[in-house]
Amino acid sequence: MTRLARTPLSVLDLSFVAADGTGPEALRSTIELARHVDALGYTRFWVAEHHNLPSVASGAPDVMSGQILAATERIRVGSGGVMLPNHAPLMVAERFKVLEGLYPDRVDLGLGRAPGTDQLTAHALRRRQDIAPSDDFLDRLRELMLWDSGDWPADHPFRNIKVMPVDVRLPPIWLLGSSGYSARLSAQIGVGFAFAHHFADHDVLDAMLTYRSAFQPSERLAQPHAILALAVVCAPTDEEAEWLAGSVDLAHLRRARGHHDPIPSPEEAAAYPYTEVDRAFIRRNRDRVLVGGPAKVAEGLERFLDTTLADELMITTAIPDLAAKKRSYELLKALQAAPVEA
């Protein structure tokens, strides 16, 4: 049995808006995809928080999580993640305790340090808060965990505030990262870690292996659990996968130039007048995207699992065609039932 056959598979979906689609269609497609992968037997379905991006329909992972939980039966659902600098920790605790109360043992609370947007929008998100002059993520994280545990100092003014429902604990906390900082912090406080290889510049091996080697057991998590998030486009043949991945290539190229347009179709991508510089960028970026038929993708996934020792793979497939996206996840799941030997 290959490592892939033994490794849980999960999904990250950002509700990407297609160039010929609408925001509401993107939101409904996310829920439909969640139903689909729930039936296929995927482990988790996470949604993200981004703001002021025409390519992303949802900036509200808590709202989307509730809708997806209501539409599915078994799969764990959560945030990948809530960008903690944008929110009062008390509000995050309330919203996710409500979700946990409604759907016990099916909710995940993934947290990120970045604002998930540009600096002006980040200011608009936080302008009514007492904004610290520097990064206050760690202070917010400590406060969030204290809202859950109730272990405030005896003289702390928040000690008598109760987060409702009072008889529900927060769901499992995960720290998200694209650098080494969250890997080290996750290990130090004993929570799960998810590394965003699909857009990270930081070395994936450093982040994943640092987390595992430095992990300290906690009341929340006894053993390290590292999720590796990967961008994958799988189709019945390598040629079809390459055609579909044209959407990913052009979207990444535009994003690198500061343009967050809706996701282009493969036809639009094929007709784009790429320069040699553009093509060189796409070739480099393909180091972060697995594209191919089942045999080629299986080989790539096994390689990542062997080197990173990931406990779980979280797949994101940023193509605009929902039917092709569903099929990609079907093919990936089928690799576990009948793995293609590399």
Image (cartoon, rainbow, N blue to C red):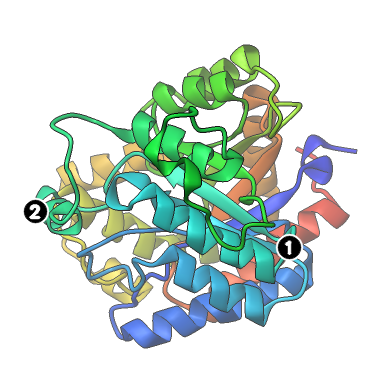
The numbered disc on residue 6 is none
To which residue does mark 2 refer?
120
Q: Residue at x 40, y 48 (%)?
A: 89
**Of the residues shown, which amino acid type is indicated by label 2?**
Leu
Q: Residue at x 33, y 73 (%)?
A: 57
Residue 8 image position (x, y, % from top left): 75, 47
Residue found at the very far front of the displayed protein: 155
**In the shown orientation, is residue 215 left or right of residue 80?**
right
To which residue does mark 1 refer?
104
Which residue is at the front of the view, 93 or 122?
93
- Vertical position of residue 54 compared to residue 215: above or below: below
Residue 200 image position (x, y, % from top left): 38, 36
Q: For the C terminus, which image quadrant? A: top right
Q: Residue at x 70, y 68 (%)?
A: 103
Quarter-of-image position of residue 158: top left
Q: What is the distance, in whole Å, between disc 2 and disc 1 at their CAs?
A: 37 Å
Which residue is at the front of the view, 11 or 64?
64
Question: Of callouts 2 and 1, which one flags the residue occurring earlier in the amino acid sequence?
Answer: 1
Q: Residues within 10 Å of mark 2 (few under 14, many from 20)?
A: few
Quarter-of-image position of residue 293: bottom right
**In the shown orientation, is residue 246 left or right of residue 105?**
left
